[in-house]
Amino acid sequence: MALTPLTTASKAGQARLTALYDRFQQADDNCRRQVEEIINQVRHQGDAALVEYTRRFDSPAFEAAQLRVSEAEIEAACAQVDHELMGHLRRAEKRIREFHEREREQSWIETRENGVITGRLVLPVDSAGLYVPGGQGGSTPLVSSVLMNGVPAGIAGVKRRVMLTPPDAEGKVNPALLAAAREIGISEIYKAGSAWAIAALAYGTESIAPVDVIVGPGNQYVTEAKRQVSGRVRIDMIAGPSEVLVVADHTAEPTYVAADLLAQAEHDPQALAMCICTDQEMATLIAAAVAEQLPQLERREIAARSLAQRGALLVAADLDEAMELANRLAVEHLELMIADPFAWLPKVRHAGAIFLGKYTPESAGDYLAGPNHVLPTMGTARFSSALGVETFVKKSSLISYSREALLADQKAIDRLARLEGLTGHARSATLRT
């Protein structure tokens, strides 16, 4: 059986929960060293390093002249994408845009009676880099990543949005990726992948100007590269393996729960598919449904490894316990397949995205619902949020004093500054009055 039910009160269940609470992962020393070397090579060798790494790992005959995707390539790609797919992309883009439009923050100013003016300016960064993984050598283009990362940046007002994605063995990019980029107004696209793409976005090369923010998913090398350049640029988050937790009571449909667990498990052997039931019989039915559906997946070997190594099927005493465990786990995707999910929604404190009811699969959020699918993982939903418009803006404070206002505050400024031993601070206020 792919999943074996464990009660949360059992010794085995407690051990499984302890491991799940402490699931934050960092790159191993070997990965860190390799990424550090890659970043150094790109910093000092520029385009030459990008070409060398691309030849070694993606496209053996790659040339520097192929780095930037030409307008002709984009036009040709758009001509190859069928109208039905373009219709789906436009529908998804519309939903994502409508959702993220509501995230816009306004600048504001307030004036006090004594003439003090304070406020906040909300301004976009100048440039953002969107990394899009190649996906099985270009055969499974992650078009949703283009939309989920590119649309909020556009809404924020970022003037320069640049996309990097690895080429296939022939030095090409899947047409669907280029069509998706064109659809949302991105035309600056380069063929580069993995850690060297992140290094290029952070430090720049002869062909690629550096950016202010880097977003987008990737493997452990991409994640580690983003960690190493964080601080020089803003990154969206340190992301780990994708994860889902289904909370299911006696009203859940076992086949739906199983399908959603398998949908998560097929991502990657490190993906984390979890379910907490409130009913032993339901847990048994879910385990059986998983075993029945697993052979039907094209990626069944990956899913089987994920479930065997990382999967969890737990039985809690009741919904109160199940919801408390869900909060402690602080998962990326939380599905509530229970009788009245909205009644239990106020109990949720930590989750990247919440899916309510048995007709709301996590895949709807991945593609079409509208909210962003770039979400915190590894328990970081305790303090992190989904990618959004705010990822691409920064906020500047405004302060303006009249002479009258400074006179009113001068004594307090002087006392506080001298308390901290900063007499120059005190003097800068007192000499004006």
Image (spheres, rainbow, N blue to C red):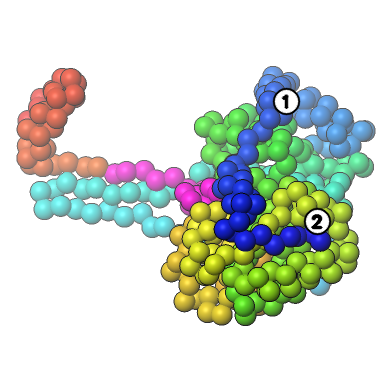
Q: In this view, does 315 lie to the left or right of 311?
A: left
Classify the position of the N terminus by image quarter. bottom right
Q: Is residue 293 above or below residue 114?
A: below
Type of the residue with mark 1: Asn
Q: Is residue 321 visible?
A: yes
Numbered badge on residue 204: none
Q: Position of residue 2 (x, y in %)?
A: 80, 59
Q: Is residue 91 visible?
A: no
Point out the stretch of residues depicted in magenta: 378-398
- In contact (CB < 8 Å): disc 1 and disc 2: no
Q: Residue at x 44, y 48 (%)?
A: 123
Residue assigned mark 1? 30
Q: Is residue 339 above or below residue 215?
A: below
Q: Helix or strand or loop: what does disc 1 sit on? A: helix
In this rendered view, identify the residue nearer to me: 24 or 87. Answer: 24
Q: Position of residue 249 (x, y in %)?
A: 60, 74
Q: Where is residue 243 in the image (x, y as percent from the top left)?
A: 66, 55
Disc nearest the viewer among 1 and 2: 2
Q: Residue furthest front?
A: 11
**Which quadrant of the structure image shows residue 40?**
top right
Q: Position of residue 352 (x, y in %)?
A: 55, 57
Mark 1 is surrounded, within 10 Å at the Cα level, by few (under 14), some (14 to 19) or many (20 or more) other residues, namely: few
In this rendered view, identify the residue nearer to me: 268 or 119. Answer: 268
**Which quadrant of the structure image shows residue 337?**
bottom right
Q: Helix or strand or loop: what does disc 2 sit on? A: helix
Residue assigned mark 2? 303
Q: Which residue is drawn at 57% across and 65% down?
A: 316
Q: Which residue is drawn at 86% across and 58% down?
A: 300
Residue 379 inside the magenta-drawn segment: yes
